Image (cartoon, coloured by chain):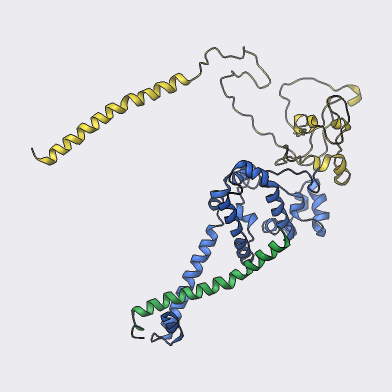
Chain colours: A green, B blue, C yellow
Amino acid sequence: MSTLESIFWHVLGYATMPFIFIVGYIGVAAAALWLLSLGVDKDI
Amino acid sequence: MTFWSRLSRPSKASAGVLLGLGFVGGILFWGAFNTGMEATNTEAFCSSCHAPIVAEIRETIHYSNRSGVRAICSDCHVPHAWTDKLVRKVQASKELVAFALGTINTPEKFRARRGHLAHREWQRMKNNDSQECRNCHNFDFMDFSEQGRRSITQHSTALASGDKTCVDCHKGVAHRLPNMSGVEGWQ
Amino acid sequence: MNSKNSVNRFMAGLLIVVACLLLPTVQGQQADSGSGMAKTDNVTNGGQASLRGLTELDETREADLFKPVPRDRRPYKSDYVYQPPLIPHKIRDYELSANANKCLTCHSFKNAVDSGATKISVTHYESRQGQILSDVSPRRYFCLQCHVVQTDTRELISNNFKPVDSLQ
């Protein structure tokens, strides 16, 4: 693996972690809001 | 933007309900994510593309031995620490491209590329001081009196001083070797 | 007779017809596999017993038990001049192929100095015509053709062989 390639993959690899956290947060938020919309929050 | 407006305004639901939703949602997401990642660590998953190479381990000490302990692909080829594992998994997405292009989809193509792939893996092991070997083979707990003469000579000098790392000598411990001409220490 | 009954009878008839069609095929296959077997009546080894005992060619002899291979120790003494020296250590998983020769990583001229292993003899560099080559001759490359791991076992056939005086 060339140095450039190695840097590229390492940046991509470490950038994945915050990406996964954010995607997880948005996913859980979407599911929770949908659940709430079925009941108490209906009139917003 | 109903999603954003709902997300940014206070809910009518109680704090307990909201916290509960986040808690349960978090557990489910994390569980699913980790299960999915672990599924890519199984021997069956590796074999779905690398079947002939996976089969090679069967002759070796890491598969067949007197005590019944064995290593699977991910024990040696994927870091065990979670962050390193994730980084390696993302790097491995490159292999999906190779799979789509059919880079090693015939035995001939694989043989031609085997040296390249082996050297890359040896370099990886050398860079992280053979971390995946050391996950099981801990130098601090090696009893030299239980080792052979040749092992003692090498382990008590070059390995102990950090001059060499496991993979410098132990190549092909779970696979057949590529053409070794030009590799340091070989002919 | 109602319609349901006639359907049942039709299905039963169909089954019998299909069975009749299939039966010869199955029998044919059995007959084929029978005639495919090689005739082995007159294959013998002439009653010759070898070191492996008396086993006819068409039988598979039960395999011997594995010999325990001792860990690193002094090589046993040679019993006769020109005996290929025995290997005094385990060699499990040491690859010996066109790709790699694990033995030479210690025993080659270059590596023997550092490893302290026995150097291979110069005869290994000779071609069939007696020409000295720059590297191990292909005919001497596959070490295990002559050298075997030493192990402390009983002789296959008891004998009173004695090495010559110079080797005793």
Residue B156 image-quadrant placement: bottom right
Query: Where residue B31 sits: x, y (%)?
Result: 50, 67
The answer to whether C67 is drawn above or below residue C115 in the figure is above
Residue sitting at x 83%, y 55% = B157
Residue sitting at x 54%, y 60% = B38
Residue A3 image-quadrant placement: bottom right
* Residue C63 as seen in the image, left or right of residue A22: right
Q: Which residue lies furthest to the front in this view?
A: B101
Residue sitting at x 58%, y 14% = C44
Query: Where residue B81 sits: x, y (%)?
Result: 63, 65
Q: Nearer the viewer, residue C14 or B30?
A: C14
Can I make out residue C60 in this image? yes
Q: Residue furthest left?
A: C1
Query: Where residue C97 sits: x, y (%)?
Result: 72, 37
Q: Residue furthest right?
A: C166
Q: Which of B13 and B63 is in front in this view?
A: B13
* Residue A29 as seen in the image, left or right of residue C96: left
Q: Nearer the viewer, residue C145 or A13?
A: A13
Q: Nearer the viewer, residue C164 or B38?
A: B38
Q: How many marks?
A: 0
The answer to whether C91 is drawn above or below residue A41 in the figure is above
